Image (tube, rainbow, N blue to C red):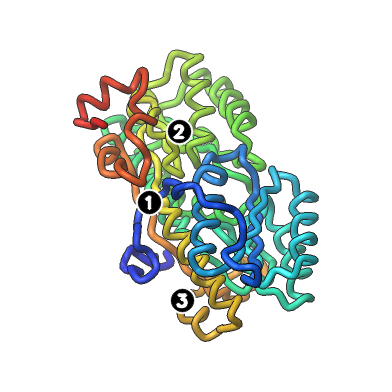
């Protein structure tokens, strides 16, 4: 597993672990002649993080470094993603930061940027087969390992427990890395019979509704029996939990997640989800902005010093200069530690049904 960069990147990460959006800031450039940086995000449907966290955090981090961010979201549409990229390139952005809906469209956009001499940072997702200059993300194999470990712990007293795996998009390199991390942990347990794999399916586009349908089909085909669900993120976990509620199984079947969304934390407090994975997006945005600032100044030496890791493109074999940050598992007992000023607010997760669990855990406003 590739080594992860921890919070010791203190010079960049003054608020390590903070995923909450910063206070509202004006969207005008910091200066009329500030270098423009284009940011294209993938969608708002598959995870709440893109709109709630990444967009405002990237915008603010770029502005703090004297850059003029142009941030748009492709809403899961590959054609729209390419059109946004063309528009940004025509506006002569100095750097392009992209989290593409698929590796194919990401690679195409990178080719266009390369022809115009515009460096590209792959943000959160490596576009396999592409030509990105840099890559900033999390150690997604470690994400999968954390998820698998949490599920194994939850099923420790249930030998032969039946597991269904619901993964992300097969076209997303991150989903493949998460699955690899999961398989490294659970493969030996499946082989020994300690756990039994019912089925493992990827869900195209990380589509939550499709994930729910896939899970229900697999559950029905297995006679309505399942002991644990390895769901790749909180959105898919929510769809799985909806199906489990329909069959009277919610709360008795541990489900994993990722992204530490408000809904994911509320599901953990209700006892419907066993764990989520916290990826400190504030770190990711800060490092990406620092890298973009160096590239906008045409300071490749500084950019290279920031991106001190190498990630191999599985299609081309090219080594991409990278920064990989460390994820953290969040279970019920960890929730209190991720709340507070500038973070997820107590009232967001403790309203309504989870209020009793919050009191039990000592979570107060």
**Residue highlighted by disc 3:** 306
Q: CA distance from mark 3 to mark 1?
A: 21 Å
Q: Few, some or many C-alpha atoms within 10 Å of disc 3 (few <14, some 14-19, many ≥20)?
A: some
Q: CA distance from mark 2 to mark 3?
A: 38 Å
Please give the count of numbered marks on the rendered protein: 3
Name the residue: 56% across, 83% down: 300
Front in this rendered view, residue 72 or 23: 23
Look at the picture and state if 319 lies above or below 156.
below
Q: Dot 3 lies on which element?
A: helix
The residue that label 1 is drawn on is: 18
The residue tagged 2 is 229
Q: Answer with the quarter of the image where residue 228 lies.
A: top left
Q: Is residue 161 visible?
A: no
Task: Name the front one of labels 2 and 1.
Answer: 1
User: Is residue 217 at least partly visible in the picture?
Assistant: yes
The mark nearer the N terminus, 2 or 3, is 2
Is the C terminus in the top left, top right, bottom left or bottom right quadrant? Answer: top left
Q: Nearer the viewer, mark 2 or mark 3?
A: 3
Where disc 2 sits, the SS reads strand
């Amino acid at each position: 597993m590739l080594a992860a960069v921890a919070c010791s990147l203190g010079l960049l990460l003054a608020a390590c672990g903070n995923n909450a959006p910063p206070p509202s800031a004006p969207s005008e450039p910091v200066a009329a002649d500030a270098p423009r940086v284009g940011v294209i995000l993938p969608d708002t449907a598959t995870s709440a993080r893109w709109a709630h966290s990444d967009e405002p955090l990237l915008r603010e981090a770029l502005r703090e470094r004297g850059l003029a961010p142009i941030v748009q979201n492709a809403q899961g549409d590959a054609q729209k993603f390419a059109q946004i990229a063309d528009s940004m390139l025509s506006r002569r952005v100095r750097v392009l930061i992209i989290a593409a809906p698929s590796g194919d469209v990401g690679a195409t956009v990178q080719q266009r940027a390369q022809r115009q001499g515009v460096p590209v940072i792959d943000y959160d997702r490596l576009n396999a087969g592409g030509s990105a200059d840099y890559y900033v993300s999390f150690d997604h194999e470690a994400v999968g390992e954390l998820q698998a470990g949490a599920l194994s712990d939850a099923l420790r007293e249930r030998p032969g427990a039946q597991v269904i795996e619901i993964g992300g998009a097969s076209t997303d390199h991150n989903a493949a890395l998460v699955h690899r991390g999961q398989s490294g942990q659970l493969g030996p347990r499946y082989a020994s019979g300690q756990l039994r794999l019912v089925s493992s399916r990827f869900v195209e586009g990380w589509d939550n509704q499709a994930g729910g349908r896939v899970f229900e089909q697999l559950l029905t085909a297995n006679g309505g029996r399942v002991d644990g669900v390895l769901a790749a993120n909180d959105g898919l976990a929510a769809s799985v939990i909806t199906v489990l509620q329909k069959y009277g199984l919610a709360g008795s079947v541990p489900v994993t997640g990722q992204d530490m969304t408000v809904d994911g934390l509320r599901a953990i407090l209700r006892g419907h989800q066993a764990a989520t994975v916290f990826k400190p997006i504030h770190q990711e945005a800060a490092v990406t902005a620092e890298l973009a600032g160096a590239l906008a100044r045409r300071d490749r030496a500084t950019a290279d010093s920031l991106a001190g890791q190498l990630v191999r493109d599985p299609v081309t074999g090219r080594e991409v200069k990278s920064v990989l940050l460390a994820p953290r598992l969040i279970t019920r007992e960890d929730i209190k530690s991720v709340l507070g000023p500038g973070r997820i607010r107590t009232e967001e997760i403790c309203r309504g049904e989870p209020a009793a669990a919050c009191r039990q855990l000592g979570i107060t406003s």
